[in-house]
Image: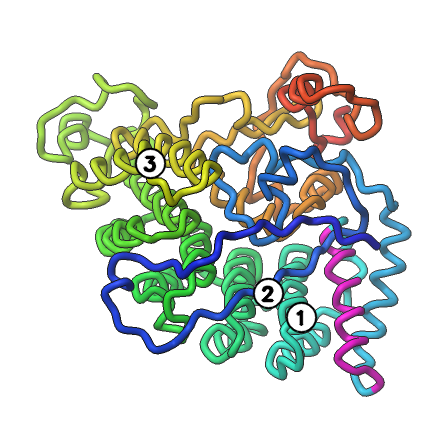
Amino acid sequence: MHEDLRRRALESGKTTSRKARSKQSSRESSKPASRVASRVTSRDVSDDEDGAGNLSDDTTQSINSIDALLEADDLNDQTPDVVKQQLTDSIADLLDRKSSNSKSREESLQTYVACLTSHLLGDVLYGHVHVLLAAFGKSVKAETSEKEAMLALRAIALTAISFSDDTIYESVSATLFRSISDSQSKAVKTAAIYSLGICLTFGGADEAEISDKLTYLQEIASTDGTFVDADDNSDVVTAALQTYGLLATLIEDLEAESEDAIAVFLDQLDSADVKVQVAAGENIALLYEKSYTPREEDDASSDEETADGDGSDDDDRPGDPDLIKRYNAFHNTPEVLDRVTELSSLSTKSMSRRDKKQLHQAFTSIAMTVRDPRVGLQTNNSSRMTVRIHREGEMRVDHWWKLMRLYAIRRLLAGGFVNHYYEGNKKVLNALPLIMRNTGLPAPTSPRKAVVSNKVAKGRYRDSRRFVSGEMSELV
């Protein structure tokens, strides 16, 4: 079993927002430990992909990394039957806790995580879910080792996305919140926040509970991690921001939360860490996008088109004319637009070329949405924002809510994302719905199976690749 996911190298140095830099903190940020790779098989990556770190579990993916985000083999080399047996064996080992030690539990958790990452194997979990969750909870609570706790947290999230059970969140919520608040490891806190987001999304939480946890995550961000004893830790703050973005896509009306949330995210734009800035900016774009909803039959155009008080006609602006403004996302949009526009061209000597590119591309798209939320998610290369599903359909990542969900699911499933689509994981398919459409292009051979002589040829493949969903397979 290979561990081939590259961990993105983060620049050293403490990362704080403007508010945090004004504080006198006596605590030092803990150095996050590298996460465990969770794929059953290895894959080849180009030098460019590896250098960008887009396949790392803790990578902060941004708009400009969508192509690399979705790049994967059509199928993992090992068949589901082989992996299924490995998973069955790991479950037996995990449930035999009396005969185990920390090292053996780490190995069993490693196998469990790798198997559920690579394929949809929820049927193997039948009859074992709650005893497994209890076992994972013990590993998280005991935190005998950082590795065991982080693997257990990932195992909880993978169980939630692989098995249909609306009581999963209720079963693990206390464990997750305790880990976020009390763990001495910042890496464990970060993993627990991401696991919380997945369990809230796929584990049976209702909208009221999800809305309440938005406030919780906002508090973590607004205090730069101090709220959960992670003072000025950029990984914890980024996890809170990204998880907020995921959960916000599940709430229909965010009018009551939008003003305060955007104020918090604006403060985080002053962070010295690019991944914090981008996560905050993307959340701002999402909240502006959600302030517009589809026009309904009983909508009076004159009332809605002047909701911002300037008497302007929305239909005179670019974007979807069927979307109308329901409320003001923030009281001072010109200020927001100035801030995000400034970041779209910010240049400092201390910023690496990679960070500068990520920042500029992300905030160029963010500024477009703040300027006119009806345009959705726009980039300079729209061809990279489409996931085509064989010959029958496609998913256009043309809205921020789709991007937020794609980030979260791909962060968890890594290279197994494609297999979960192919094998019909309904939770993934429901979160990222497809459009039935004839693309008119034949399905290409994977570049991992055919020799690709140069990067140009590989690039042409990326623009025309196909993924096959489980629900589409009968139509092929």
For the stretch drawn in magenta, what is the main secondary structure?
A: helix
Mark pair 1, 3: CA separation: 38 Å
| Three-letter code for the amino acid on which mark 2 is drawn | Ala
Between circles 1 and 2, the one closer to the viewer is 2
Q: Name the residue under label 2.
A: 33
Q: Quadrant of the C terminus?
A: top right
Image location (x, y in percent) of residue 12: 48, 57
- Specify the amino acid type for callout 3: Ser
Q: Which colour scheme is used?
A: rainbow
SS assignment at label 3: loop
- The residue at which mark 1 appears reads as 147
Residue located at (20% from left, 36% from top): 338
How far across and down, in percent of the image, does residue 392 sit?
67, 22
Q: How crowded is mark 3: few (under 14 residues within 10 Å), some or many (20 or more)?
A: some
Compared to 185, does 59 lie above or below? above
Residue drawn at x 66%, y 49% is: 6
The reply to whether the C-beta atoms of the residues labelled 1 and 3 are less than 8 Å apart is no
- Where in the figure is residue 365, as x and y percent of width and height? 37, 31
- Give above or below for 380 relative to 84: above
Circles 1 and 2: CB atoms closer than 8 Å: yes
Q: Give the range drawn in magenta.
A: 99-117
Circle number at residue 347? 3
